[in-house]
Image (tube, rainbow, N blue to C red):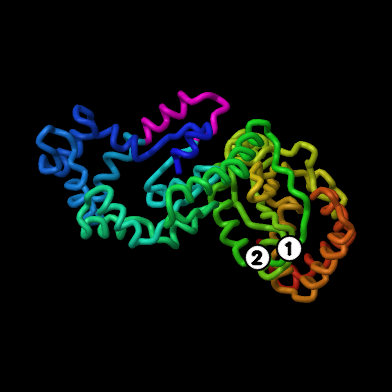
Amino acid sequence: MSSTFDELGGVIVDGDVISREVVQPGTEGLAALVEAFGSEILLPDGALNRPALAAVAFSDDEKRATLNGIVHPLVGKRRAELIEAAPQDAVIVEDIPLLVESQMAPMFPLVIVVHADEETRVARLTGQRGMPEADARARIAAQASEEQRRRVADVWLENTGTPTELADRARALWTERILPFAHNVQCGRPAQVAPRLVAADPSWADQAARILARLRTTCGHRAIRVDHVGSTAVPGLDAKDVIDVQVTVASLDVADELADALLAAGYPLVPDITSDVAHTEDESLWHKRFHASADPGRPTNVHLRVDGWPGQQFALLFVDWLTADADARAEYLATKRAVADEGHETAGEYAVAKEPWFADAYRRAWQWAVESNWRA
């Protein structure tokens, strides 16, 4: 798949190629491997015998950790050098064999997992690389499971067919999602998505979990908490297919400091949206910063609100109230359907049209909070 992206103009940073480069004869990487695992991992000409290394290093968790501790820092250093050397407007595609195992997935705006079932992978390792079957199965057993891979995948591509079939999927993905996403980030604009009410999707929670992990990594210590909010956070509630996330910060100054990092993560600032509709007298306490995803394949709204301010509190309360109160949930759904039938062309118009219902809902939600002893 990387070769297809390369043909289409992407700058490929291939972790497997780099991992081979950093253990070539004469490198500090190869010297460290020999020190850790012995000269038995070398070929007669002094090059690394990769099957021999795999047989030793994948035999137990401690040895595999030793291998990773040697190779990963060297790969990371070389990776940074290649990215730094790429043109400023390049679409960089990183091919990382152990993305899940290294827990690097939240570092990237879009994660594509190319999957093949175990038997297909064994056949390829034994047939294409000449690896003994037992070693191939040991390697696969040491890698992330399918469930773990699915958990981090924004895009899941099956690779059990022909190379041509995979290349066709890659071209479509590049044209329809990757390239528009990259251009939107470069221009600092969100993807344009018309509001459309859809049936509740059980996968929204998993999709949100990936976004939360990405935003926690992006914001680091400056985020007090990051939460899935809005209608898609309420189980079973029909909603626009947009994931709403709230990043709680100590001040709006902190929110402003995060703007560049959020853009790099795929969430440009939307400067026209600076506050929620106030439900109390002090409108300044409803101010926020609003970012939206540049990814046309996963509409996402990111609300940065100040800890303890009414907008921040209500966003958390609203999800819990609707989850607990079936009557309120049904009433809100009826409101959403009525507004959707009005045919609003933008998400902003759709949100404004729902505000009359929220005027009373705000009071009722806080009444429920008092009665139930709710805490954020």
The residue positioned 49% from the left and 34% from the top of the image is 7
The residue positioned 43% from the left and 48% from the top of the image is 163
Does the image show residue 115?
Answer: no
The answer to whether 27 is drawn above or below residue 294 in the figure is: above
| The quarter of the displayed image where residue 109 is located | top right
What is the total number of numbered labels drawn onto the structure image?
Answer: 2
> Which span of residues is magenta-colored?
76-92
Q: In 3D space, how far apart are the residues under numbered discs 1 and 2 (Cα atoms)?
A: 8 Å
| The quarter of the displayed image where residue 3 is located | top left
Mark 2 residue type: Asp
177 and 168: which is toward the camera: 168
Please provide percent x and percent y for residue 82: 42, 28
Mark 1 residue type: Val
| The quarter of the displayed image where residue 175 is located | top right
- The local secondary structure at tag 1 comes to strand
User: In the rendered image, which residue does mark 1 sit on?
Assistant: 198
Membership of 4 in magenta stretch: no
Residue 201: image tag: 2
The answer to whether 83 is drawn above or below residue 104 in the figure is: above
Membership of 85 in magenta stretch: yes
Q: Is residue 263 left or right of residue 331?
A: left
Please provide percent x and percent y for residue 284: 81, 43
Q: Residues within 10 Å of mark 1 (few under 14, many from 20)?
A: few
Q: Are marks 1 and 2 in contact (CB under 8 Å)?
A: yes
Please provide percent x and percent y for residue 306: 69, 46
